Amino acid sequence: MPPQYRLPFEKPLVALEEQLAGLERLPDPNPELREQIRSLRLELKRQRREVFEQLDPWQIVEIARHPDRPHSSDYLELIFDEFVELHGDRSFGDDPAVITGLAKLDDRRVMFIGQQKGHTLKDRLKTQNGSPHPEGYRKALLRMQMAEKYRLPVICFIDTPGAYPGIGAEERGQAYQIALNLREMSRVNTPIVCVVIGEGGSGGALGIGIGDHIAMLQYTYYSVISPEGCAGILWKDRKYKDRAARALKFTSADLLRLGVIDEVIPEPLGAAHLDHRQTALSLKIALQRSLRELSDVPREQLLDRRYAKFRRMGVFEEQAS
């Protein structure tokens, strides 16, 4: 079945997808029809690869926000076993925009923390489209400290346009809680792996983004500000969002080159929204590898390595011409 929602740059592929879907629905295809189906599949694959090899940064943002893109809850089902959700922050309430709990990655027990948007309108309203409140970050920090106590590695999935900016959230200390998480995550003495699975917006993403291994799925972005916000500040108009996206250098390829992240996890041709299972398999393999490598690091060296990792970011050498 062709996807229901099309991004603007995917629309040239619509005719081929519909033609292929129509042929595949026919009963008992003869050899000539099977050959036609095979040729159409190859042509569709060729054209899709051509489109996705030429994506600009704003188009990558559109993919990261695709409504059919898998979220933390989807990866929980596809990658992890025996998940036991842990609710609440012991202070105010339970934020549905942050999922936390104990899980198993094959035979390894882990603490899972993931930002969650939701697929339905009801769920998106409930989670504010994946924008956590202070109690969400407080809940995440409590689980990390529990993981340290029981010597469990932590896996954080980042997928947020930013922390919720409402009055109530600010009154309950939104900025303070994110700053506290940044400080305390640098001190949690257990391996932490962070993966941007969709949007990685501002301090909302950083609030669970300090780790020993930072990865991004291929078609995601990780930025201090959204392209619309940047365009509004610099050019006083959101219509320049594509120009802002180019200037921000926030794609996975940019950030790997700049040394901000450690790994880009490839997505299937056409991006994660076309094949959840294949994306989950690539993500699982990357998680297993990074946890295996971090398990060899002595605990007394872990925090020093994490500190040095973040101190290296943003260091440049300039030479007078």
Image (cartoon, helix red, strand yellow):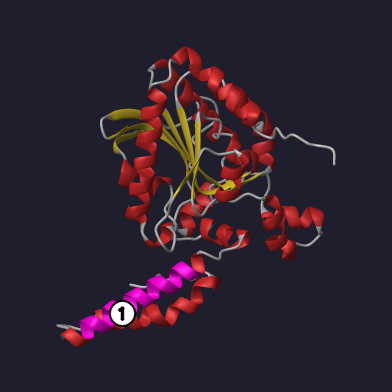
Position of residue 129 in the picture relative to residue 235 (left or right): left
From the viewer's perspective, is residue 190 above or below residue 235?
A: above
Position of residue 254 in the picture relative to residue 276 (left or right): right
Residue 208: percent from the left, percent from the top? 54, 34
Position of residue 170 in the picture relative to residue 271 (left or right): right
From the viewer's perspective, is residue 212 above or below residue 8?
A: above
**SS state under label 1:** helix
Q: Residue at x 78, y 62 (%)?
A: 237
From the viewer's perspective, is residue 72 above or below residue 274?
A: above
From the viewer's perspective, is residue 240 above or below residue 28?
A: above
Query: At label 1, which amino acid type do we have?
Result: Ser
Viewer-proximal residue, 275 or 37?
Answer: 37
SS assignment for the magenta stretch, majority: helix
Q: Residue at x 39, y 62 (%)?
A: 274
Residue 18: percent from the left, percent from the top? 37, 81
Label 1: few (<14), some (14–19) or many (≥20) C-alpha neighbours in 10 Å: few
Span highlighted in magenta in the image = 33-50
Answer whether residue 88 is magenta in the image. Answer: no
Count all numbered tags in the image, as a single digit.
1
Viewer-proximal residue, 205 or 43?
Answer: 43
Q: Quadrant of the N terminus?
A: bottom left
Q: Quadrant of the C terminus?
A: top right
Q: Residue at x 62, y 44 (%)?
A: 164
Task: Kindly give the residue lying farthest to the top in the view shown.
Answer: 300
Residue topped by disc 1: 39
Residue 59: percent from the left, percent from the top? 58, 63
Residue 126: percent from the left, percent from the top? 50, 49
Can the viewer see residue 50? yes
Can the viewer see residue 188? no
